[in-house]
Image (tube, rainbow, N blue to C red):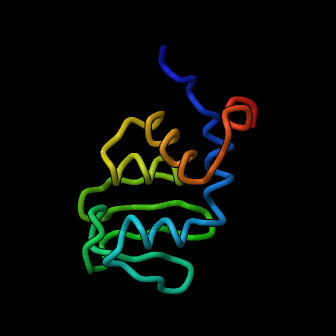
Amino acid sequence: MRPAIPNFATVNRAALPHLEALCARWLGGGRRIGAEWTCGSLQGERGASCKVNLRTARWCEFATGEKGGDPVSLAAAIHRLPQAKAAHRLARMLGLDGEELRHG
């Protein structure tokens, strides 16, 4: 039996206050510049072609054109996962329980 698809809004809302720490973990070659995490790519290299707005979670990898607007889509792009699987992994990282995930 597959786990239920988590409430993406709940996961995104819970992740937003931790976005800088998540970016530091996932995109380790980057750094904060103003309100953005800046790095070279979704693999976290040094550089400036990938940016994540730490207030809104809008992100873009300018070299490839990949973009999104929330922590779940960022996690999915970085880890090359379907969004539902990325949401589950992110929820586990944030310590969200099953009830929170279903109902938000």
Residue at horizontal 48%, vertical 13%?
A: 1
Relative to the observer, which residue lies in front, 103 or 58?
103
Residue at horizontal 60%, vertical 39%?
A: 8
- Residue 81 point in image, percent of width and height: 35, 40
Seen in the image, is 66 located left or right of residue 6?
A: left
- Residue 78 point in image, percent of width and height: 34, 54
Residue at horizontal 53%, vertical 69%?
A: 53
Residue extending furthest toward the bottom: 34
Vertical position of residue 80 compared to residue 65: above or below: above
Relative to the observer, which residue lies in front, 93 or 8?
93
Q: In the picture, which quadrant includes the C terminus?
A: top right
Seen in the image, is 70 located left or right of residue 64?
A: right
Labels in figure, total: 0
- Residue 80 point in image, percent of width and height: 30, 45
Seen in the image, is 40 located left or right of residue 17?
A: left
Write down the quadrant of residue 100 in the picture.
Answer: top right
Vertical position of residue 48 compared to residue 26: above or below: below
- Residue 52 point in image, percent of width and height: 47, 67
Write down the quadrant of residue 82 in the picture.
Answer: top left
Relative to the observer, which residue lies in front, 30 or 25?
25
Vertical position of residue 103 compared to residue 22: above or below: above
